[in-house]
């Protein structure tokens, strides 16, 4: 047992932090200002120039695709334990992940393609994604059913000769607002009569396929999250070649299982990063703001919250790192309890810390003058995205109870859930 | 002791609920749609036609200025205890209060004018406000200082012959976005050398006085709250006649004390109303949404939250009604502990209930497809508006400790705080 | 709506508080000292002389059987709303209730006998109970089954000619440790084949009937609660006359429903009283104990807790009074949601307040040098006694959900539960 | 970074667990039964035979003094990181630590003697302590002052020729009830005029020195914790040789700083162990107890709590292990934030888990039929022992704020506090 980061990780952290000091922190206001200018100019759904400027710089320094596990197309890939502390740093400025080509949902989509797509599909879609030339979306959740139980999903994928015909309505397809979003991975039912976990498949769908309509964006607590965007998308008789199916019919849940672990841990690391940042802002404001004759930092209530925040951040980080370690050493399947735990713990912790930071900032905290309200809104979605807390707590409890029954925990699956 | 509403109140409740069934609930979507259309048309800062349509209907039915205490200009005025359950109903649809000319900050401004303004000022400003022809704003909070401690306020009001000259920057001047907002009540220092609570005064300032610049709106989470708007306003050598001062120089804190009680209790009643509504939405969704083979309403966690919500709503309502009763019977000054208690309790309770409702709605809950996220954002501001929780809890504790010291609780003032 | 106590209640409060000042508070230490002396002398299960001394004084002043509703044998009986604030005062010194013949479980047993027993049984058992000459116990909970679901109860009551033969093991028969405890009311199954809620009956059993063995006392967090005592009692072929059955075979649940409401509300009022007292002790200690250069009362954390405690006590009291009002005006059946709510709210609130008081007292708080630890232990049992929180929350939720279904809330019963 | 225990630790864990299976778990009831028999026989303050039987077995297997860091007299000593998981196992049965000569306060006293005592004192007191032949107590807390701020301590240690004369009253001298307790380490003021942190000294005092009176035991909730016992001790003109002073006059705080870290971490590890055990009992009971037609384990509320418990236990353990790692690698002084964090986190977590376990056990949970109530009472003291939560949270906050000021965290001391 050892609690220090490896020299390799420390070096990457230092490099990434230096990049932040030079290119990210100084541009935080510019990012929002550029989007606001686009909004006022009448079209907010355009790529952010700042990001495009910074991407080549990051790539040059090797701060690129850090999320990608070692694989034929990514020989320098990092382990989860190595990536985690880097991902945490990116969480400190939520829009920064894209600069390093480490933004969701591209990361999950790239991993999925890397593992389950044909070489042809990889050449066509994985390569430009790895190069940061295009973006992608993941179409799973549906407005009509409780997707917290993914077996509810109703989108149909029906074979018709050499094509699959797709019909359904998806929403919360995050990133599909970006004009560079060129490809979707769609989950739907190929066989509604099959076993509960064998009905679904995943299929690759080019965004410009006829029959696809992006109907509207979904705001999050008033934010449009442009140009990323969370879209509602209608698929009407959308036809793609049979080769676009991933892994084979009925294997959608299997893919989801593989995909969900890393996706969840990335979110958690970023939640920890944003919580650290919120605590910094809290402390700085509390030290300089005076009320009733003393700095807010001298008040007992503020102190209690700072201490609680520090405790909870530390613990959430350690649990997340342990989950990463287990994913690397014993595999995502065995690590499923730990993944479910951090999935619940990290955003709830971050929400608490950000809320305390808002309170110390007074009304500035709920406005756009600090990033706190925006961070809070995003973290709030993470108690639902990839499955609501309640579904994951239930899974953790089942695994715990299994220890006292004659059950094999390996037979209890990680919940496939989007919570939306 | 008696826990039933009076026949008079029951009749008003029935009338108001009937109005809601006929005119408010059916128009909930239209309200947001109209504003969205204005936004898309390039100017969101215009009055909402729907409101203007409904105002005459409400007035016709006597559902008008219900907030106003009995007074020479409002002989039919209601007591706080009578108004509270009506205000709660308005809280169920937050934009509805204006339909009944019961919206903040006009209510507080009207009460302030009614109590402390000269007859001349009343004729000029109170009458059109009572008639719902103009709107108003209250300029207290400042960006540069912690207004949670109102003695920090720095805006200067200096006498120069027959005029006062005002200089300062205010923000969170809610309602000042509305083009109908014609008058401000401004708080500032007339004598920075006077005693801590005698430095400040309040003064009436027409919105079109030279030297006034509305600089920007402040979003709340991602909402612009148009056309109401929370504005930052600069006052530069703004000149008004000396007669515009309310009550006299140095009496700003005294007015604030009188004004804050009713304002706080109105917010609380509306918080209770919105919490009731959120619980309704929660139950309705939980009954019809199925996950893992049963309705969400059948899950133990949902049940626990419904029960907790019901308990907390009931208790917050009773405490608010008791505070209203005390304001009516022993006065705002004696009721200050109760007012501080509900100020803390009500929005925290509402936030909890709305958050649970969001969770049951999944991603729809954080979007614009339900009003929940918007309600949550608004309630979150109420933990800061009129003073942060922490300031009020401190005041409650001081009053409690005073019981065990040889202190006269009458000498402990209600906190004058805006928390921003 | 009116929040003041009636003149009659105020007079009784004043009288009772005067009695406390004169006879109860000055004897608090003596009570525990007397029991400790008995313990050291080798038999702690003897009546407390102090109580016997004070009973005639209380009776003389008309502070006797205050709990009893108006009825033929108690023409001066009080309403629930009238009794509630008196019961709260008794809660300030938990052992004091017996001085006024208002102690559980005698109160519930007297009410049950008054309502459901034959005149003969009343003469024999109710009269000496009303006179405070004997005590009683209620034998419902069983060690072998989850009594939170009272349908689980297994004790058998079988008719054999003119007698019922009772077999079973009961525990948590509180008060059965007292040598003056002369009569039990026993719940058990007369017909295990009947409908779920028609299997059980209640029967009166003299404590000295052959076949009864008091096996042991059950400690509560290390306390023996002597001489009251929570006993485990074995009933082996215990025979009583058929006339001892209450109301008739199969009507045990019906009686339980009638009995449980008042019992629960009494507990709640006492919880509120003890919480008030804990808050007093907290404030007094915080004002005089100095750490890190200032009184504990000056520390922000202490202040926050005092304020929270005051808010929660006020709200729990109001909800309890409202429940009492409803029991008086619309009946226990309609008031069942309110009764369930206070059943959950009051002890949880009291536990929180007492815990904070313990923390301010440091190690003295967990010891016998303050009554806080003992109070805490007792309140902790109230989250289980008469049914665990979870069962009551479930009942509240069912009633809430029923509003949105086509269900008649009258058909949802109050949970018959002992939670043990 | 690595999250697996070392092979050496795994071997010791296996050995210790085997010892538990063979000798500890099967004797849990006997332990309490033996003490109860002593109590009933009239003297509970006698050593427990069971412990004495088991000690040689543990020693034989090398499971002895595991707590002791590597040192001249303990060449096989373990690091904190190695000991932590073993200490956790002992926490599963709180009385078991003594079997392995790893019980507080002997462990802290042995470490203190080992580091700071003369060879003569070591021969006389450390050797028999290491051999488990005698026990010891630590006399720091005083009833008259808030010992949460240890500068308040008033006991006087005055030099008189070749002796020190000690006068004072101490309480919560845990273990001093045991007749084998032969030596005390006493903290008191040698120079009340010195700097705030140079007034105090520590001195070794044989328990049979004239002038010492053990006045009474202090119960914890209703438990006497015999034969260990928490005693109040009067020291009246107690004379010991000058050589008994540890390290020198005025260095009491320095010693306290060194002693407190390990003591706190041991408590935390045991809290984690007892929480694990409580969760086991919770799960087992929930699986076999049926209410309302299904096992309690199938109810959503139970599931939520199990999941929360698992998350919080894991996180508290990781933070504690990290603190141990830091103590080993960078020293107690640098690790002070982590030590303060676990000091707060671990007992609060354990209390929550045990409380949930009690709730699932119903009334059995608060009685003596499960160890849960006793465990809870003990954990509750740990929110005060070695300093109340509030003092430690304040210390954590100060360290956090120091990061944003120009402060050297090394100059912020670990709080010397007993919280009593």
Image (spheres, coloured by chain):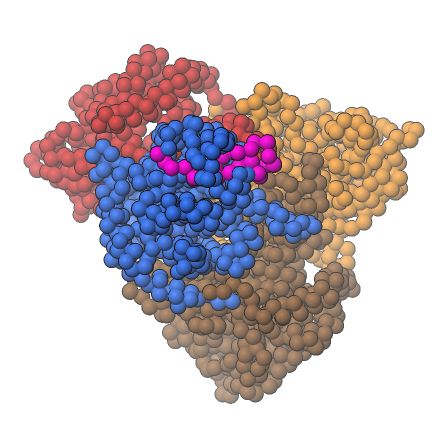
Chain colours: A brown, B orange, C red, D blue
* Rendered residue at 30%/28% (across/down): C104
- Count of marks placed on residues: 0
Question: Could you say which quadrant of the image residue B86 lies in?
Answer: top right
Please tell me which residue lies in front, D33 or A248: D33
Residue C344 counted in the magenta span: no
* Rendered residue at 50%/22% (across/down): C4
Which residues fall within the magenta stretch?
D187-208
* Rendered residue at 26%/55% (across/down): D57
- The picture places residue C259, in percent across and down from the top left corner, at 30, 32
- The picture places residue A386, in percent across and down from the top left corner, at 51, 65
Q: Is residue C312 visible?
A: no
Question: Could you say which quadrant of the image residue B12 lies in?
Answer: top right
Q: Is residue D1 visible?
A: yes
As drawn, is C19 to the left or to the right of C156?
Answer: right
Which residue in the rendered view is the most extreme toward the top?
C60
Please tell me which residue lies in front, A284 or A227: A284
Image: B217 above or below D183: below
Image: C20 above or below D286: above
* Rendered residue at 37%/42% (across/down): D136
Quadrant into which the C terminus of chain C falls: top left
- The picture places residue B308, in percent across and down from the top left corner, at 46, 44
Please tell me which residue lies in front, C157 or C62: C62
Please tell me which residue lies in front, B87 or B9: B87
Which residue in the rendered view is the most extreme toward the front?
D161
- The picture places residue B215, in percent across and down from the top left corner, at 81, 49
As drawn, is A416 to the left or to the right of C377?
Answer: right
Image: A118 above or below C37: below
As drawn, is D114 to the left or to the right of A97?
Answer: left
């Amino acid at each position: 047992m050892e609690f220090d980061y490896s020299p390799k990780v420390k070096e990457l952290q230092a490099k990434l932090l230096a990049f932040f000091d030079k290119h990210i922190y100084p541009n935080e206001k510019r990012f929002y200002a550029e989007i606001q200018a686009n909004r006022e100019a009448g079209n907010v759904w355009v790529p952010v120039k700042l990001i495009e400027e910074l991407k080549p710089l990051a790539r040059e320094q090797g701060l690129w695709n850090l999320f990608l596990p070692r694989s034929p197309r990514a020989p320098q890939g990092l382990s989860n334990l190595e990536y985690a502390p880097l991902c945490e740093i990116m969480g400190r400025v939520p829009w920064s992940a894209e600069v390093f080509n480490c933004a969701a949902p591209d990361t999950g989509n790239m991993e999925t393609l890397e593992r389950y797509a044909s070489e042809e599909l990889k050449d066509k879609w994985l390569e430009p994604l790895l190069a940061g030339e295009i973006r992608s979306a993941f179409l799973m959740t549906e407005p009509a059913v409780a997707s917290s139980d993914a077996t509810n999903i109703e989108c149909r994928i029906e074979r018709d000769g050499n094509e699959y015909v797709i019909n359904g309505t998806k929403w919360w397809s995050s990133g599909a607002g970006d004009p560079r979003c060129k490809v979707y991975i769609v989950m739907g039912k190929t066989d509604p009569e099959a076993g509960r976990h064998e009905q679904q498949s995943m299929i690759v769908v080019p965004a410009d396929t006829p029959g696809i309509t992006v109907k509207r964006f979904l705001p999050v607590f008033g934010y449009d999250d442009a140009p990323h965007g969370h879209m509602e998308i209608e698929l009407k008789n959308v036809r793609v070649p049979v080769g676009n199916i991933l892994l084979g019919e009925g294997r959608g849940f299997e893919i989801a299982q593989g995909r969900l672990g890393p996706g969840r841990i990335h979110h958690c690391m970023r939640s920890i990063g944003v919580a650290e940042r919120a605590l910094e802002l809290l402390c700085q404001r509390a030290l300089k703001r005076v009320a009733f004759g003393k700095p807010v930092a001298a008040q007992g209530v503020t102190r209690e919250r700072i201490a609680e925040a520090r405790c909870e951040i530390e613990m959430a980080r350690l649990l997340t790192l342990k989950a990463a370690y287990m994913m690397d050493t014993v595999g995502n399947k065995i690590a499923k309890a730990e993944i479910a735990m951090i999935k619940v713990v990290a955003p709830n912790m971050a929400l608490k810390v950000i809320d305390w930071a808002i309170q110390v900032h007074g009304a500035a905290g709920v406005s756009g003058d600090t990033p706190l309200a925006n961070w809070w809104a995003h973290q709030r979605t993470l108690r639902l995205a990839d499955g609501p807390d309640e579904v994951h707590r239930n899974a953790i409890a089942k695994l715990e109870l299994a220890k006292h029954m004659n059950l094999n925990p390996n037979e209890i699956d990680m919940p496939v859930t989007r919570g939306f």
